[in-house]
Every structure is written in structure tokens, then in C-alpha cells.
Amino acid sequence: MKEQLLAIKQTALKAMSEAKTLQEIEDIRILYLSKKSEISSLMSKLRDLPQEERPAFGALVNQVKTEIELALYEKKGKLEEEALNQLLATEKIDVTLPGYQFYQGQIHPLNQVIEDIEDLFIGLGYEVADGPELENDHYNFEMMNLDKDHPARAMQDSFYVDENTLLRTHTSPVQARTMLLKKGAPLRIICPGKVYRRDDDDPTHSHQFMQIEGLVIDEKITFAHLKDALLTMVRHLFGSERTIRLRPSYFPFTEPSVEVDVSYQKKDGTTGWIEVLGAGRVHPNVLKMGGYDPDHYQGFAFGIGVERIAILRYAIDDIRHFYTNDVRFLSQFKGVNR
């Protein structure tokens, strides 16, 4: 059987040297290396040999298979290279043909609004702060002057994961965490991010939405500083002719608190007002829990919905358009400026 095996090897190597096409190489592979090949049939006769000859014959079979496989690999590579060279010699490239069209995406309209506001406040000396969306009840509510049984919690119906963990209902916990990190030092921050509340989705409400909150803490901060910051932001977003109106309101974390309306001109030429955000002086309890002495430090805070800004700026009629990922809708906002 040893002579038969060597003869098979010589025949296979001779056939490979004479092969002219890749198909011939594949036929040789099947003939000599497949499970039904002559070499495989010789392996099945291994049990007919004396016990002491079996290891040597098995090693010889493996050696022959390896030599045939190596020769096949080299011959196949040579034929593939020849085929490629022939193809390159016959093909021509028409450099006058137009190139491929690459479709470039655009920034989501909500991110456009966020980046616009970030640019404004960074220019005013603010820092951009962020924090986790899965938040601890302590930071989300308690440090915002909302105790465990505070009735105002009902205004922010929440997604709780367990008794003490929930999806944040506002970006205020970022403010709480930043106050603790500052350890009583003055700060100016804005906190953009996604928030969650158990709300029925409709054209003006969503169970998730984007929010930007601002917080300033320093000595001798007055309500006039808050009004100036709000007016600057509103005119940056909607135009220099706009003005604001402050109405008394209630938020647990600010005192006094206000709702902020933005002016617009009606069709009849009279002035109308649209509510856009809430704001106020930081509550003394919030300052204390954040590590500040309310006798020496004061602050103001505000919070605005990003979707509300985008709806007003771009005349969008349904908040759900922002989250359905419809390319026809999103493509309208490529390079949109205020």
C-alpha cells in the first residue's frame, strides 16, 4: 500500500502541474482529497496492516495529503494571479464617469437646539454638566426639596425600577450632584439631557423628552440676574424683538418661582404670549443640602423643554415626529439655523 500511496501522490502532482484552469484544480482536489478519494480509501485499509506498521503508514498518509494540499494552494494562487492580470490587461477605467454619491446625514433637530443653547451659555461662562438617566430617588427628589411623601411628587409621575431607583424625571439631579462636587464653590452650569415621565403620548406630550436646566450659585445673586439670563436666552432662540413675561408659580426647589412667557405678534398686530419654561431663585433648603450657606450664597435656576423650543422655532405640529426616525422629516433640518 505504501507504493500505491506514493504512486497516487506522483499522479496528483503531475495533474496539478498540467492544470490550466481553476476548475481543473478544484477537480483534482475532489479526486485526491475528498472523503471518497483513493487516499481516504487507503486509510480505511489501515486495520489490515500489522499492528507495528500502522503508525508509520498513517504518518505517511498525512504527509502525502499535506504535500498535495500545499501543491494545490500554490497552483491555485498562481492561476488566480494570472486570471487577475488578464482581467487588468483587458479592463479600462473611464475617468470621466461620475463618482459614487455618498449620502451625508445631518444633526437631529433636537441636538441642533441643544448645541445652539450650549454655545450660547458656554460663551457666557457656563459649564455643561451631565449625569445618569437611571437615578437615585435621593438626588432626583429629596435634594430638590421633595421629601418622600411630598405632594408635589404627583406632578412628576415616574418610572421606578425599585423603591429607591427611577428614570430621572428632570435633569435637576445633575445640579444636585454638581453642587456636592463643587463643595460650596460658586458654579454656573447647564444640564441638557433626556428625562422620563409616565405620560400618555399625543401631539404635545411624550413619555420621554429632552430638557435643559440651568443653575447659577454665587454671592449677591438677585432676581435681576435671572431675568437677564432668561431674556438673553429667549432673544438668542427666537429673535431680538422678543420680550418675556414672568408670572408667579410654584416649584418645590425654587422660591420665589415663576413661569416664563415669550411674546409674539398675532395676525391682528397685537401681542400674544406663549409659556416656554419655569424658573426661580434656588430654595434655601436646596442650597443647604448642596453644601452652601444660604446666608452667603444665592442662586437661580431654570428649566426648558428642548422639544418645545424646536416646535416653536420650526413650526412642528406633533412632538412624536422627533422620535419616529422618519428620514423624510429629519432631512428637512439639515443646516437649519435659527
Image (cartoon, grey):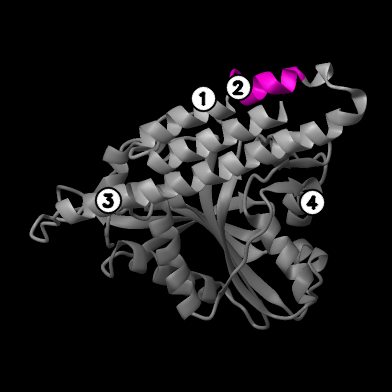
- Give the magenta-colored segment's residue range: 35-45
Q: Which mark is residue 38?
A: 2
**Residue extending farthest right:** 52
Q: What's the amino acid at mark 2?
A: Glu
CA neighbours of label 2 inside 10 A, class few (<14), some (14 to 19), many (20+): some
Instruction: Give yes or no for contact between labels 3 and 2 (Cβ–Cβ under 8 Å).
Output: no
Disc 2 is placed on an element classified as: helix
In the rendered image of this protein, does residue 186 appear above or below residue 317? Answer: below
Residue 134 within the magenta-colored segment of the rendering: no
Instruction: Tell which circle, 3 or 4, labels the residue nearer the N-terminal end.
Output: 3
Give the spatial CA distance, label 3 vs label 1: 50 Å
Quarter of the image for residue 129 reads bottom right
Give the spatial CA distance, label 3 vs label 2: 56 Å
In the rendered image of this protein, does residue 143 appear above or below residue 301? Answer: above
* Front tag of 3 and 4: 3
Instruction: Give yes or no for contact between labels 3 and 1 (Cβ–Cβ under 8 Å).
Output: no
Give the spatial CA distance, label 2 vs label 4: 82 Å
Give the spatial CA distance, label 1 vs label 2: 8 Å
Answer yes or no: is residue 327 visible: yes
Instruction: Tell which circle, 3 or 2, labels the residue nearer the N-terminal end.
Output: 2
Reading the image, the residue beneath label 1 is 31
The front one of 112 and 283 is 112
Quarter of the image for residue 172 reads bottom right
Reading the image, the residue beneath label 4 is 142
Give the spatial CA distance, label 1 vs label 4: 79 Å
Q: What's the amino acid at mark 1?
A: Leu
Predominant SS of the magenta segment = helix
* Front tag of 3 and 1: 1
Reading the image, the residue beneath label 3 is 103
Instruction: Tell which circle, 2 or 4, labels the residue nearer the N-terminal end.
Output: 2
